[in-house]
Image (spheres, rainbow, N blue to C red):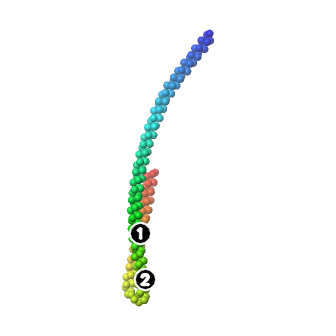
Amino acid sequence: MSQIDDLHSRITAALDRISQGLEGISESAGEADVSEMDALRQQLEDEKTANAQLEERLKRSKEKLDALESSAEDAARAQRDGLTKLDSDLQSLRRANSQLRDNNQALREANAAGVSEPHLINKAMLSELEGLRAARAADRAETEAVLGELTRIANAAAADNSEDA
């Protein structure tokens, strides 16, 4: 029986040690769970804050984009109007030059037939030269308008790229 009592006391001591071990584990696990939960809550709050900041940045970016698109549309409309007027002026100038060349040709033919005066032909030639100079100036203005618009577009694209970086 002494062996039974000895075994009984050994089993009881082992069960007590196991019980104490489990209590220690549950206490430390409880503390770990609480601190882990606090850490997770803090991370969640940090993520919510970051998400709100990103949403605000996205909202500002969309507003900037809308403003840029609106101003680009206005600029494009103004540019189209300017180019339409320039094209109309060029067409008118080209018609006038064509008519002037036809008139000069008729004057030269009349002079060859001996019907007109040479000083009128000279005046007509000077007018034709002036018309050609005006046509060249109009072509140059058109080229400068196109180059100006292309430069503006390139600068805007470069500015957009630098903002994105």
Q: Quadrant of the N terminus?
A: top right
Residue 63 is situated, as x and y percent measured from the top left of the image, at 40, 51
59 to 115, vertically: above or below: above
Residue in the foreground of this view, choosing between 151 and 109: 109
Q: Which residue appears at 55% of the width and 21% of the height? A: 18
x and y percent of residue 133 in the render? 40, 75
Q: Mark 2 points at which residue?
A: 105
Tag 1: amino acid: Asp
Mark 2 is on which residue type? Answer: Gln
Q: Pick the residue in front: 94 or 11.
A: 94
Query: Regarding mark 1 in the picture, which secondary structure is present there?
Result: helix
Residue drawn at the location 43% of the way across and 86% of the way down: 109
The residue at the point 51 percent across, 23 percent down is 23
| C-beta proximity under 8 Å, tags 2 and 1 | no
Of the numbered discs in the image, which one, if any, rests on residue 116? Answer: none
Q: In this view, does 23 lie to the left or right of 138?
A: right
Residue 154 visible, this orientation: yes
Q: Identify the disc placed on residue 87.
A: 1
Left or right of 14 in this view: 108:
left
